[in-house]
Image (cartoon, rainbow, N blue to C red):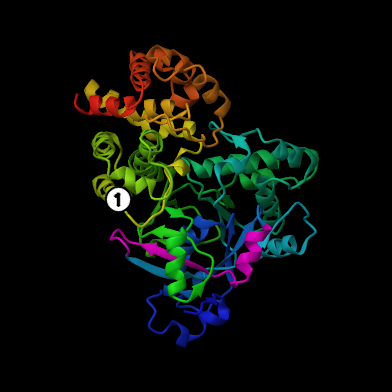
């Protein structure tokens, strides 16, 4: 079949789409104004937020379109422009081979921004900043793009040298400075706004607020920002930073998916997602918002305390499951495309995940609009989706930052509830797997490259002193086990937890197949 490049002209050709099982936009994107901004308009922007916006646009075109912002890859913007910024989203259900392609049109264009605020792209973005119709922006950047560390309060600690220089010189080389510059233009226009971080970490709204206020304080002090800008960002009645929980698996396509699109006669950019989609959002939008709650899987809540219940549920059930596979699964050889699905066919891995979920359900606070038991049942189905080419190594990225929210918070909560030691040990087992993962050699002595991690130097320094076949060398990992930022506490000062975790790691160092034997041992206790 001859393929055609997806663009607006093709989208408007009813004859081309006849007989094709493709979901098309039901609105005229050529006539609808922009009412929101999407910073870092990548996979999750199209596959999650953009998908929600499309559903709302289909119901009510007054929802408005989004305009995207990209700061990393000009080539990405060029490729999307060839399709008039339309993207094909194959939505894979859990039945093998069952897919519904969807043409995403809610993002009407993407602006590429560099550090030159005199460019036409910047001029266009700042016009949107001054437009009263524009109500909010989302941020889909990775955590590292913020360039700060944050442990609570009004301000963050800048650690990225590019951001630090932007703060000192009033420049916009970093993403955080670009977001702040946009907010400053909004302030000058005297308009209200909401900036919604959709970055996948807890308290993302607080984190984003602290980041922008840190930049604003420096700029205002040095005369790069007008007086009152920091106060503006500190007033949620004028400029808010809603917290949210975001949940959807969105991955790059593999060759089989590309061939399916060719069979439809479509040549386009792709974002592959599962069917499940959730978004719990703190409802503070001073400039107004679309009727988000009308979209499937969206929950509006009045406070962060309520949103956090969804966060904790997701982190401790779905994300926990992913991290079990990204540690123990990787060690058992489950790497590469479809690695998540393949790992779930391993009875030990699947059993461990289910048993930890049982502990989570006993200890996590229940959100108002979702039952953790139902979410857990759905999570198991999602993890067993044979159509999603998800690589566990994707989850291993920044693994040290994931131990506390995905495992140790459950451990401490279960301990406080008096759950027996046998159950507590099951929660520790994947943490031991993470520590063993840092050696870069799996259970069959096959090497792999570690994913990036903010503490990679520490992880590799400890791992270099441990030796497969020498269980006593587990002492090399004591700095990790006692690291408060990784574990939440020094585990050697938390009863016998540190000693128990070190013993688990020692068992996994006993030789080939030691990881598998250790999992089996603790599952039978």
Residue name at image x 73 percent, y 47 percent: 173
Rendering coords of residue 341 (x, y %)? 33, 48
Residue 186 appears left or right of 283: right
Disc tally is 1
39, 463: nearer the viewer: 463
325, 113: nearer the viewer: 325
Q: Secondary structure at mark 1?
A: loop
Residue name at image x 55 percent, y 48 percent: 236
Q: Where does label 1 land, which residue? A: 384
Rendering coords of residue 489 (x, y %)? 43, 20
Question: In the picture shown, does residue 15 fall above or below 289?
Answer: below
Residue 195 appears left or right of 21: right
Rendering coords of residue 377 (x, y %)? 25, 48
Rendering coords of residue 6 (x, y %)? 54, 75
Residue name at image x 66 percent, y 65 percent: 78
Residue 522 appears left or right of 240: left
310, 232: nearer the viewer: 310
Q: Is residue 83 magenta?
A: yes
Q: Residues within 10 Å of mark 1 (few under 14, many from 20)?
A: many
Part of the protein shown in magenta: 74-97
User: Is residue 448 among the parts visible in the rendering?
Assistant: yes
Question: In the picture shown, does residue 473 fall above or below 124?
Answer: above
């Amino acid at each position: 079949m001859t393929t055609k490049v997806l663009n607006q002209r093709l989208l408007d050709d009813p004859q081309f789409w006849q007989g094709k099982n493709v979901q098309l936009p039901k609105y005229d994107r050529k006539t609808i104004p922009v009412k929101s901004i999407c910073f870092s308009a990548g996979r999750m922007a199209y596959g999650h937020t953009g998908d929600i916006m499309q559903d709302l646009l289909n119901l009510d075109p007054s929802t408005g379109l989004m305009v995207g912002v990209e700061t990393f890859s000009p080539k990405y913007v060029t490729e999307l422009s060839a399709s008039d910024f339309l993207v094909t989203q194959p939505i894979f259900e859990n039945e093998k081979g069952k897919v519904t392609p969807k043409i995403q049109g809610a993002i009407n264009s993407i602006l590429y921004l560099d550090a030159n605020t005199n460019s036409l792209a910047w001029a266009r973005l700042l016009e949107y900043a001054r437009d009263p119709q524009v109500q909010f922006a989302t941020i889909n950047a990775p955590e590292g793009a913020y360039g700060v560390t944050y442990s609570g309060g009004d301000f963050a600690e800048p650690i990225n040298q590019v951001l630090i220089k932007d703060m000192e010189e009033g420049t916009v080389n970093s993403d955080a400075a670009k977001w702040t510059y946009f907010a400053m233009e909004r302030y000058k226009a005297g308009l209200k706004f909401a900036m919604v971080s959709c970055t996948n970490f807890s308290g993302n709204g607080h984190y984003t607020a602290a980041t922008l206020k840190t930049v604003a304080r420096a700029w205002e002090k040095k005369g790069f920002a007008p007086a009152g800008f920091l106060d503006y960002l500190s007033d949620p009645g004028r400029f808010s930073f809603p917290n949210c929980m975001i949940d959807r698996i969105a991955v790059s396509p593999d060759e089989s998916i590309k061939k399916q699109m060719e069979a439809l006669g479509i040549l386009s950019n792709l974002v592959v997602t599962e069917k499940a989609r959730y978004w719990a959002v703190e409802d503070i939008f001073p400039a107004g918002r679309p009727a988000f709650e009308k979209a499937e899987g969206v929950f509006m809540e009045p406070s962060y305390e309520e949103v956090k219940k969804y966060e904790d549920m997701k982190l401790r059930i779905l994300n926990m499951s992913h991290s079990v596979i990204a540690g123990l699964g990787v060690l058992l050889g489950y790497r590469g495309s479809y690695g998540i699905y393949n790992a779930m066919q391993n009875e030990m891995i699947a059993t461990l995940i289910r048993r930890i979920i049982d502990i989570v359900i006993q200890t996590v606070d229940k959100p108002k609009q979702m039952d953790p038991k139902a979410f857990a049942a759905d999570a198991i189905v999602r993890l067993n989706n044979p159509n999603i080419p998800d690589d566990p190594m994707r989850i291993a990225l920044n693994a040290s930052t994931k131990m506390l929210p995905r495992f140790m918070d459950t451990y401490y909560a279960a301990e406080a509830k008096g759950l027996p030691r046998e159950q507590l040990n099951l929660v520790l087992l994947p943490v031991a797997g993470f520590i063993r993962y840092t050696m870069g050699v799996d259970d069959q002595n096959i090497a792999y490259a570690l994913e990036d991690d903010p503490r990679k130097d520490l992880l590799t320094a400890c791992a270099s002193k441990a030796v497969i076949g020498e269980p006593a060398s587990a002492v090399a990992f004591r700095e990790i086990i006692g690291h408060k930022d990784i574990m939440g506490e020094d585990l050697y000062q938390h009863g016998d937890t540190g000693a128990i975790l070190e013993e688990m790691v020692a068992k996994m160092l006993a030789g080939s197949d030691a990881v598998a034997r250790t999992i089996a041992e603790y599952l039978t206790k």
